[in-house]
């Protein structure tokens, strides 16, 4: 039943050969690689205002512009830096790889942990913001925002298990629609005010306060706006997805992306100042502007719809990114190996599922509130930026290839700027949630190291030197100690006994007695059955089945002293319906689990199948 | 780690021999057998008032007395009826047994299902009411009532897993304390008003309404009060726990119990009328009366404390009752067999745990509200009363032993009265919750029948006629097809291969290739290792490991046509720390699960143990 449902939701298995991605030119590469980065302009401006408006009132809009300028400057520095990463890592240079390569294991793991957290947050934040875009257009849905967000996550999870490719051209179209609509809104919005003399009347009152700007407040606003830069590293991760010359194309896309963000983020920030949007938890700032600019006609709904779509797509990029990152780390042995295994549809199913579950939990815990989630967000992103830039810096300094001074200067500046930003974000948002991330990252690194240690130890103990040959076995002279436990004399037992007789002529039937009456009956039946195989009965006062069996195997009475393996043949009847298993004491399973921990044992399971209508 | 915690909470295992109960005389038998019945007087009167007061206002107290009289009459009829059950079932006559014996399987199961539901409700209701007694004395705890109730349930669950005996004299003392305190309160309360001329001033205003009494309203009040009778059947279930002459002693205790309930329930009802208690969700009616009578001194707190204790003890009786009932039904094959297995401390652990979990869930769903839970309660009790009485009636009529007319008349009257009461309760409380029970009971009966069918079918297929002898096996001439799957050439594989060589000289090593590179490496290594055993490699385009293996086993190429069992020897490395298992693809387990469904296979697990510091 479960497997039918799985087939319906996920589809048929795909062959490994079918694993190959499309390659993109610049035109399609831009929208496909950048939905995460571009979509963040939907909430970044609002985040700045949320910091400023309650303190500064009307004055906020001035400082919003300043903060936006700083962010745009930072973005250009990052663009220069990442261009160099693209040059150096033609196979894709994610922070985990760059940091591990150039800085060592621990920085690599810190980057890996930060990225993991951020991918999970990307899904939670993007889907929550997507829901906010929907509820801004249809306020009656507001009470259901958590459910809507969870539905979006489930949809993404199933879609990715089926194998939506991030890299399908289909995904490029809504991004272009969003870019074009927002740019049109910006142009028309500016035109309406400056040339048509439209006087904006804000829907929400601006608080009549006029607090003073402080450095801390400004830095908080700057930190809040830095969420606009998340996702900008995606292009450098995805170099191999570009058509040849792939590095050149990737760099061109990165430049175009920066330009797009500059226009959109800058434009929205400017519109906010002239339209005096006031952030609140019913209608997003972007929706307020769109409403003012287009006056609630079809273009307003078009903006909301494309915003929602691009935000969901941004969530989807995390579904492409995290499972891949976890597969990398799993191959290196830092996370459980199951994450390196491709599922039926070739996606890394375990990573996809865990991302869906964790981001869903975050949405539930934070009640789908974009603002609360964003407080946790940017720290991790900027930690991974810093590590990636520092890694590049170290790389140039170490290699000292041509132009290394110039190159190390660029990445060095990038590293310093992102480091400063990380500190700013960490401090200004510490009590709002950044502390969680700051505790989580070392905890995750510790765990990853423990996992690695475990795998190394297992590999060391399993390693077989090729000169260690199999032992000499005289097949004819084998003792072959075989024990067949019996509970009831039935067909399942008989099948196990028959099997035992094919592999040995040194068999003992063993019964653990927990109930004198039942044992009496069994022995009577056994005597009548009369097959000439000895039965041994041991009492079990504590009703444990395994205890007396293990004790007997290890006793002087039996194979003790012999170095031969003892074989325990377990009759196990198998019911064909899954729920049937609930109805039986899983004694065979328990015996197996306990016996497996002994060195000189082999456990044979002989299935006897019960057919049910 | 888990097992250490278990040991701390539950204690060491107990031997089966330690299973024996104390036997009680009348003096101790009364409190021990009746905490459930007696404790229900703590809420029954309040339930009547909750029905009447919102409609009748001041007039309620008159009709409360009438309803109480009807209930007391019904109780005496039940007492007569159950005396006869005690005579007929010296080994204990629970409704399930009486109904199954005399009316057949389906009525027995209906009684079993009703009782199951009621035991779960007993725990939820009693602990919630116990919490209400606590919060009435300490109103500051009111916001935490769900948590307090859950703590009580956890406490009962762990206590019963350790093996608190319901039948310990220690449990008799609080019951006597409760009886004595309440009777003293009744006497003093009446004396205070009638002889000292005290004029009660109610804490809560009686609503100024004067609706008219209707038959339906009166029946609702009656139905609500019938919760006072729950638990009265416990004495007849527990006949073997009495000292000889056990039947005579049990009957005497039943009579004394009726008398006690008459005095306490009647007395509290009367006090409610003269003290005009108004039910509400902060302070229980009993607490209001105690507060009026004793004026908030130490006796008030004593009443609240003993009430809370006796209610928790009433919950405890369900922990003794349900697991035993489920063990009975499990032995008959109507519920999963695990319920018939005694745990470490000789209690039926599975029944105890499931009771704790389900009653806890009920408390959470109903937010610990006694009144809401009570709406579901009495239906099931009265269905089982009816079935038990009808069973007894049929028994007398069939056997026609001396005095059968007289006896059948008593049980017949009991059956008719309880049946009418069941109908009244079912109708008047239908929409408040009784409908849930009325849907659940047939669903449970259906499930129980399905389980029974499953067990019967399994038993039929496993049954071994004693003349069906083991097959002839020529040990020397056995073919012994043995396959050893290989993934990596390591020590674990070598151990499995060595084992395979002890049981057969017809071995094939089998590799499923999902990754050409890894397969190439393995083959190169295998050739170098050079042990003269053939290796077979099959490609798996869909990355399934089991598929190609099963296909090969069933292929013409291999053992097809032969009727011999194919043995698959699985190397399995075992990590000693429990969390280690999370870190490995459980391929061996998966292979085993899939292969187990084939008839002609035996699966050998050869453990290789990895030690970890």
Image (tube, coloured by chain):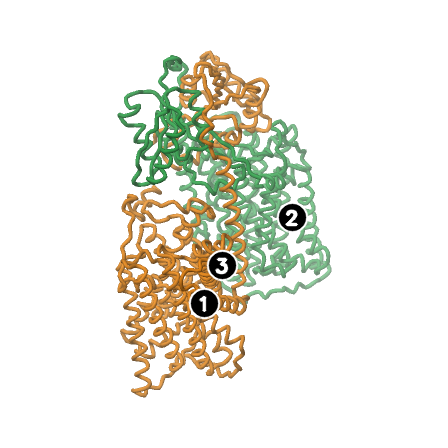
Chain colours: A orange, B green
> Residue B524: percent from the left, percent from the top?
36, 33
- Determine whether the residue tagged by mark 3 lies in a helix, strand or loop: loop
Quadrant where the N terminus of chain B is found in the figure: top right
Q: Which image quadrant is residue B138 in?
A: bottom right
Residue tagged 2? B309
> Callout 2: helix, strand or loop?
helix
Establish if B449 lies above or below B145.
above
Chain where mark 2 sits: B
Residue A155: x and y, percent? 34, 55
| Neighbours of disc 3 within 10 Å: few (<14), some (14-19), many (20+) | some
Q: Is residue A154 above or below residue A509?
A: below
Pointer 2 or 3: first along the chain: 3
Q: Are marks 1 and 3 on the same chain?
A: no
Could you tell me which secondary element the residue under label 1 belongs to? helix
Where is mark 1, residue-wise? A409
Relative horizontal placement of residue B259, taking residue B419 as reference (left or right): right
Relative depth, front residue between B94 and A109: A109
Marks 2 and 3, how far apart in space? 36 Å
Mark 3 lies on residue: B213
Q: Quadrant of residue B74?
A: top right
Chain name for mark 1: A
Q: Does residue A363 show up?
A: no
- 10 Å crowding of disc 2: few (<14), some (14-19), many (20+): many
Vertically, is B414 above or below A171? above
**B114 or B185, nearer to the observer:** B114
Query: Which subunit holds the residue at mark 3?
Result: B
* Relative image position of residue A190 (x, y in whole percent): 32, 82
The answer to whether mark 1 and mark 3 are in CB contact below 8 A is: no
Is residue A304 something that shows in the picture? yes
In front: mark 1 or mark 2?
1
Marks 1 and 2 sit apart, C-alpha to C-alpha, by: 76 Å
Task: Identify which residue is drawn at 49% across, 34% down.
Answer: B338
């Amino acid at each position: 039943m479960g497997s039918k449902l799985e087939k319906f939701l996920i589809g048929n298995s795909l062959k490994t050969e079918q694993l190959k991605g499309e390659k993109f030119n610049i035109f399609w590469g831009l929208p496909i690689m950048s939905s995460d980065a571009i979509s963040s302009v939907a909430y970044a401006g609002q985040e700045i205002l949320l910091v400023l408006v309650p303190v500064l009132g009307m004055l906020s809009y001035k400082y919003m512009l300043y903060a936006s300028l700083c962010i745009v400057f930072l973005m250009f520095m990052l663009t220069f830096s990442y261009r160099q990463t693209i040059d150096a890592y033609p196979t894709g240079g994610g922070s985990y790889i760059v940091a591990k390569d150039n800085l060592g294991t621990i920085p690599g793991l810190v980057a890996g942990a930060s990225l993991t957290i951020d991918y999970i947050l990307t899904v939670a934040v993007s889907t929550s913001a997507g829901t906010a875009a929907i509820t801004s257009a249809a306020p009656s849905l507001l009470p259901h925002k958590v459910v809507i967000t969870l539905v979006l996550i489930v949809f993404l999870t199933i879609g990715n298990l089926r194998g939506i490719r991030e890299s399908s051209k289909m995904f490029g179209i809504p991004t272009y629609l969003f870019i074009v609509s927002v740019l049109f809104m910006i142009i028309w919005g500016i035109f309406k005010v400056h040339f048509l003399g439209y006087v904006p009347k804000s829907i929400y009152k601006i608080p009549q306060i006029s607090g003073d700007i402080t450095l801390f407040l400004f830095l908080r606003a700057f930190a809040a706006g830095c969420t606009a830069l998340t996702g900008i590293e995606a292009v450098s991760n995805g170099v191999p997805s570009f058509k040849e010359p792939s590095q050149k194309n990737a760099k061109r896309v990165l430049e175009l992306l920066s330009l797009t963000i500059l226009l959109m983020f800058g434009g929205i920030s400017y519109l906010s100042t002239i339209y005096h949007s006031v952030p609140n938890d019913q209608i997003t700032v972007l929706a307020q502007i769109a409403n003012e600019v287009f006056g609630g006609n079809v273009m307003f709904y078009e903006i909301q719809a494309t915003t929602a779509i691009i935000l969901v797509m941004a969530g989807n990029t995390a579904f492409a990114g995290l499972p891949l990152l976890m597969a990398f780390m799993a191959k290196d042995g830092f996370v459980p190996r199951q994450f390196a295994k491709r599922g039926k549809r070739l996606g890394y199913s375990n990573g996809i599922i865990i991302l869906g579950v964790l981001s869903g939990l975050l949405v539930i815990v934070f009640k789908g509130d974009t603002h609360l989630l964003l407080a946790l967000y940017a720290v991790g992103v900027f930690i991974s930026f810093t590590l990636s830039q520092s890694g590049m810096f170290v790389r140039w300094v170490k290699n000292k290839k041509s132009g290394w001074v110039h190159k190390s200067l660029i990445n060095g500046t990038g590293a310093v700027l992102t480091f400063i930003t990380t500190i700013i974000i960490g401090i200004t948002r510490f009590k709002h949630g950044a502390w969680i991330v700051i505790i989580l990252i070392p905890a995750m690194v510790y765990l990853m190291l423990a996992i690695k240690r475990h795998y190394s130890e297992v590999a060391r103990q399993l390693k077989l030197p090729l000169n260690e040959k199999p032992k000499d076995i005289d097949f004819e002279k084998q003792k072959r100690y075989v024990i067949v436990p019996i509970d009831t004399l039935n067909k399942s037992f008989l099948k196990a006994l028959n099997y035992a007789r094919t592999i040995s002529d040194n068999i003992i039937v063993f019964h653990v007695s927990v109930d004198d009456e039942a044992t009496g009956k069994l022995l009577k039946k056994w005597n009548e059955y009369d097959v000439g195989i000895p039965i041994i009965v041991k009492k079990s006062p504590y009703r444990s089945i395994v205890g007396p069996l293990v004790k007997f195997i290890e006793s002087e009475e039996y194979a003790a002293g012999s170095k031969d393996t003892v074989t325990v043949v377990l009759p196990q009847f198998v019911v064909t319906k899954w729920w049937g298993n609930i109805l039986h004491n899983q004694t065979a399973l328990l015996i197996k689990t306990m016996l497996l921990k002994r060195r000189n044992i082999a456990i044979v399971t002989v299935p006897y199948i019960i057919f049910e209508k």
